Image (cartoon, rainbow, N blue to C red):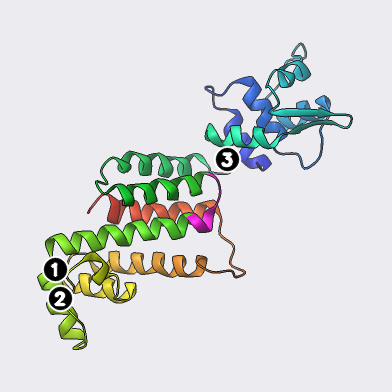
Amino acid sequence: MLELNDLKTWLHKKEISLPDKLLMVLSTFDKPAQVKDITAQAASAGLKIPKRTNTSSILTRTNGLAIRIPEGWELAPSGETHLKNIGINKLGPAAVNVAIELRSELQNISNTTTRSFAEEAIKCYEYELYRSSIVMSWLVAIDILHKYVHKNHLSDFNKEAKRVNNQWKPARTTDDLGKMKESDFLERICALSIIGKNVKKELKDCLDRRNACGHPNSLKIGPNTVAHHLEILLLNVFKVF
């Protein structure tokens, strides 16, 4: 669940209890670990466990979050879930801050359906479902933009859309706006100065990333890429519109 470098980051947070730190150390093993292995792994990440500490006793009292088998200790599935629930994952501190900021913006999203999608996007991010987070967060962003245009610029938008494409049928609802290709939609709202050229470029990059993550392929996505994607949407859509 955690790499050694990630472990170093989390072990030095004072607010995390020793039992949770031991569970974090266990999460770095891909096979059962003896107490001496746990102690050595913790030390390699900068956490010295005092000799008087009864590591086995502490792990036993985690109520099944860690399991003892003849070969040693291993993290139970419930232990993985517990660590994720308290915010322990592969995300670095900066990436975690993005999730925190996103959560703080939830209250500003008035539409309950949109807010539900946004919350799901954040959960996907925190649970390391990176492709899903990218797709879900883009759906939220484009929905916010559609609603903003529908409420504030619908007439001007229809005029611009008609100017570019004479076949455009004037939109009356947000669903009508959704009939336009999202890349074209970004072009139209940029022409109306609803977003700037640089914002349009960044949002198109987010759209390309969303399209790449929307179907099975060999593309690999890590937490930093997703953090960047979410931060762009946070700063240029969620906090603006």
Mark 3 residue type: Asn
Residue 49 appears in the picture as rendered: no
Where is mark 1, residue-wise?
154
Camera-nearest residue between 110 and 22: 110
Q: Residue at x 27, y 73 (%)?
A: 185
Q: Identify the disc placed on residue 89.
A: 3
Q: Is residue 201 above or below residue 238?
A: below
Mark 1 residue type: Leu
For disc 1, the neighbor class at 10 Å (few under 14, some 14 to 19, many from 20) is many
Q: Identify the disc placed on residue 224.
A: none
For marks 3 and 2 on the same chain, the one whose residue lies earlier in the sequence:
3
Q: Position of residue 121 (x, y in %)?
A: 44, 50
**CB under 8 Å between discs 2 and 1:** yes
Where is mark 2, residue-wise?
158
Residue 70 appears in the picture as rendered: yes
For disc 2, the neighbor class at 10 Å (few under 14, some 14 to 19, many from 20) is some
Q: Is residue 109 above or below residue 148?
A: above
* Magenta span: 127-132
C-alpha distance separating marks 1 and 3: 43 Å
Q: Is residue 145 above or below residue 109?
A: below
C-alpha distance separating marks 3 and 2: 45 Å
For marks 1 and 3 on the same chain, the one whose residue lies earlier in the sequence:
3
Camera-nearest residue between 203 and 41: 203
Q: Position of residue 95 (x, y in %)?
A: 47, 45
**CB under 8 Å between discs 3 and 2:** no
Q: Quadrant of the N terminus?
A: top right
**CB under 8 Å between discs 1 and 3:** no
Q: Residue at x 50, y 67 (%)?
A: 214
Mark 2 residue type: Asn
Q: Quadrant of the C terminus?
A: bottom left
